[in-house]
Image: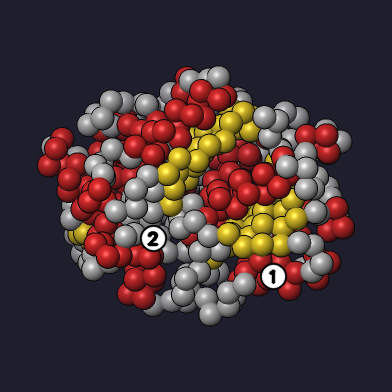
Amino acid sequence: MTHPQIVGWAHSKFGKAPEENLIDLIASVVPDALTHAGVEAADVDGIYVGVYNNGFSPQAFEGSLVGMAVPELAHVPAMHLENACATGSATLYAAMDFIAAGRGKIALVVGAEKMTSTPTSQAGDIMLTASYRAEEGESENGFAGVFGQIASSYFQANGDHSLELAMISSKNHAHGMLNPYAHMHKDFSVDFCNTVSDKNPLVAGPLRRTDCSLISDGAAALVIAHPDVAADLERAIAFRARNQVNDVLALSRRDPTEFAGARGAWQKSLAEAGVTLDDLSLVETHDCFTIAELLEYEAMGLAPRGQGGRVIREGITHRTGKLPVNPSGGLKSRGHPLGATGVSQHVMAAMQLAGDAGTMQIDGATMAGVFNMGGAAVANYVSIMERVK
């Protein structure tokens, strides 16, 4: 399959945004993405909007909001997608399918979320809708409680890995210091992250505050095009592979520490691309909680099951290591506005491959992997990307 290519992008600063609503967040990135791609609103054949919402905003029907934000796009076919924390990747893949099916030549992909206006307790309950509420809906501390249970299970089977989780957190915060778009610019030491204190209390199970990603506002946009169109534009980031693999929603019906769907998505995409992890220059992965990144090391094949801790201990995933993971700071530091996250991850990877990542740049980056998941490794997306021009 010849995949559509990324030809432009834009990214807001994540955090507590001054924009008051989704329309304003969308308006903050769409014009810049079109300009970056070198296309006009009249060139866009389809619009795909990723917003999780489910109570973060009283305004639904999000596909229509792009036309409100940018009136020149009001008559372009638009639709909204949602797939929990993988909403952004689901939206991107749907837009790519639109072009691959011959329905259009250029598509606009937007991911956005306004979360910080919602009280924390309410936000936690909203995010629990990405779990199997019949069994997991009473989890304390929202989704942190779900991943706290996963961390506890992993520790019971493989020993206490609190230090390794602290090392992952410290790494991602150090990387985030280099990212001007990141929500949190604070460089936490491993010792701070590994010590329970008033500033770093336990949140759920063995997870501390520094093990948990942030509630953030933000938006990101991508312009994608058929390769024939991309050939005439300034830049083109291609997909060697893109795959989605699902797993069972209820944690009680699978081993929650296996991340089998994530492993399957990685295996399919690496095989389709005809590459191994050794060929990748970097990975942007879904560290909603530090235990997730640890389990993703195992799922992507950096270590056997139960041995993911050695990956961070050996420094493999630092920006100076063999395979930098989350050079953008990841969700842990960059932030996690749910609908924007998957789009943001692909923007971060595209910037690296284009050599436009500024202070985040990994020297000589030629190929990148992106892993974005919805729920506790239920909807799993893996992209393998490289620069064409």
Q: Which residue is mark 2?
A: 130
Taking the image as shown, residue 139 lies to the left or right of residue 47, namely: left
Task: Name which residue type carries label 2.
Answer: Ala
**Location of residue 157 with respect to 344 vertically, above or below:** above
Taking the image as shown, residue 331 lies to the left or right of residue 81, namely: left
The residue that appears at 44% across and 28% down in the rendered structure is: 267
Q: Is residue 33 visible?
A: no
Q: Give the SS element for disc 2.
A: helix
Quadrant where the N terminus sits is top right
Q: Position of residue 302 (x, y in %)?
A: 36, 26
Labelled disc at residue 2: none
Task: Name which residue type carries label 1.
Answer: Ser
**Location of residue 268 with respect to 344 vertically, above or below:** above
The residue that appears at 71% across and 62% down in the rendered structure is: 78
Q: Give the SS element for disc 1.
A: helix
Q: CA distance from mark 2 to mark 1?
A: 24 Å
The residue that appears at 49% across and 56% down in the rendered structure is: 83
Q: Are marks 2 and 1 in contact (CB under 8 Å)?
A: no
Labelled disc at residue 64: 1
Q: Position of residue 249 (x, y in %)?
A: 34, 52
Total numbered labels: 2
The residue that appears at 50% across and 41% down in the rendered structure is: 244
